Amino acid sequence: MKDASGTSPVSGIPRSLLVLGGTSEIGLATARRLIVRGTRTVWLAGRSSPALDTAAAGLRALGGVEVRTVAFDALDPGAHAETLGKAFAEGPVDLVLLAFGVLGDQARDEADPPAAARVAQTNYTGGVSAGLVCAAALQAQGHGALVVLSSVAAERARRADFIYGSSKAGLDAFTQGLGDAMRGTGVRVMVVRPGFVRPWAPARRGQLPPAGAQAPTALTMATTPGEVAVAVEAGLRRGAETVWVPGALRVLATALRVLPRALFRRLPI
């Protein structure tokens, strides 16, 4: 990532940020953290909505940052090059955070194949398209980083959320391959694998989670958007390729990956 002097510190704070999924709690938490540390231009890409406008206004209220929005629909890959190109056309983008995705509702989606396909198209094919568009733009400018939010659910399919998990597994594998393809180009790619991310803010504790949200268990290691944001910044600073949130999740995921399937089915996850 280049700073204003033209240098390219491998672990510096980005001056400009493009968030794909402009209303994502993790995306916004990361943007807030980076703004405090020196990010001065933020693009929020998402479907035009009052929620997107509210998110942009919230970041502007922090002061010292220019926040713009751009219409973006993960389910419209044919438009990705044009819509995301608007951000890159305004100047260098130091960091792209791919933060969009849908959890879906496992029981409902099993009974509704088109709905299940929509989850896969949003999380995987939308991510592939947007990831390739942004990687090409970063490569053309000669520097930058692409951070992709995966999930611990990508590591092994669970009965409770295998539709969502399989879509994240595809995105995770794609991101790893894209990282290899970008080596030597000046573009860094980092995949972030959080555990269960609480979908409701601490200020709303006591309320029920959104429909379709999976309850955390001891084996999913719950985290928060703020904790993921901290981990993203730390990963950028140290030049990581993979970040687990929390860090202990790496060991647990490794153990679960090699557990015999008959035993894995019995776990309360």
Image: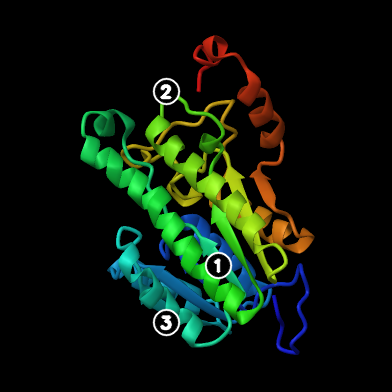
Note whether residue 24 is visible: no
Q: Amino acid at mark 3?
A: Lys
Decide: is 252 above or below 37.
above
Residue 170 at x, y = what percent? 48, 43
Question: Disc 1 and disc 2: Cα gap in Å?
Answer: 33 Å
Q: Nearer the viewer, residue 103 or 206?
A: 103
Q: Which of label 2 and label 3 is nearer to you?
A: 3
Residue located beneath label 1 in the image? 135
Mark 2 falls on what kind of element? loop
Question: Disc 1 and disc 3: Cα gap in Å?
Answer: 15 Å
Quarter of the rendering containing residue 116: top left
Note whether residue 14 is visible: yes
Residue 32 at x, y = what percent? 57, 68
Category of crowding for the residue at label 3, using alpha-carbon neighbours closer than 10 angstroms: few (below 14), some (14–19), many (at least 20): some
Residue located beneath label 3 in the image? 86
Q: Amino acid at mark 2?
A: Arg
Decide: is 165 above or below 174.
above
Mark 1 falls on what kind of element? helix
Q: Which of label 1 and label 2 is nearer to you?
A: 1
Residue located beneath label 2 in the image? 159
Decide: is 94 above or below 269.
below
Q: Nearer the viewer, residue 59 or 72?
A: 72
- Check contact, mark 2 vs mark 3: CB within 8 A: no
Determine whether, in the image, residue 239 is placed left or right of residue 18: right
Mark 3 falls on what kind of element? helix
> Mark 2 or mark 3, which has the lower sequence index?
3
Quarter of the rendering containing residue 240: bottom right
